[in-house]
Image: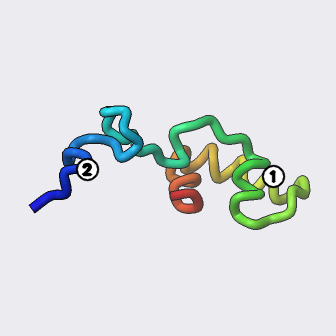
Amino acid sequence: MTDENSPPPDENPGGTGAKPVFRTGAEQEWEPIDLALAQGRDPTPENIERARRELERDGAAAIERIVP
């Protein structure tokens, strides 16, 4: 039994009627400094270079390991 005030199962609880859009962290452009900071590293030249290599090598997977 459902409450008469409950939205239908496919309706967004915000009341817009739109279904929620789920995104991952890798759907946007990331700079090496962003990855270094997301990994909890200080933005030193060495850490930024390490992050640049990871992004170059792994692409979105480098981000998805860090940002859900």
> Disc number at residue 5?
2
Q: Residue furthest bottom?
A: 40
* Residue at 36% from the left image edge and 46% from the top image edge: 13
Horizontally, residue 17 falls left or right of residue 34, namely left
Name which residue type carries label 1.
Ile
What residue lies at 74% left-to-right and 46% top-to-bottom?
Answer: 32
Quarter of the image containing the N terminus? Answer: bottom left
Task: Give me the C-alpha separation between circle 1 and circle 2.
Answer: 51 Å
Query: Which picture quadrant has residue 37?
Result: bottom right
Q: Hey, which quadrant is residue 19 in on the image?
A: top left
Instruction: Please count the marks in the image.
Output: 2
Position above or below: 2 against 16: below
Tag 1 residue: 48
Is disc 1 in contact with disc 2, using a CB cutoff of under 8 Å? no
Asked whether, in this view, residue 46 is left or right of residue 67, the answer is right
Give percent across and percent down for residue 41: 80, 65
Give the percent coordinates (x, y) of residue 50. Answer: 75, 56
Give SS at disc 1: helix
Rendered residue at 58%/61% (across/down): 66
Q: Residues within 10 Å of mark 2 (few under 14, many from 20)?
A: few
Picture disc at residue 29 = none
Q: Nearer the viewer, residue 26 or 20?
A: 20
Closer to us: mark 1 or mark 2?
Answer: 2
* Residue extending farthest front: 4
39 to the left or right of 47: left
Question: Which residue shows up at 90% across the image and 57% down it?
Answer: 44
Identified by mark 2, the residue type is Asn
Residue 23 lies in quadrant: top left
SS at mark 2 in the image: loop
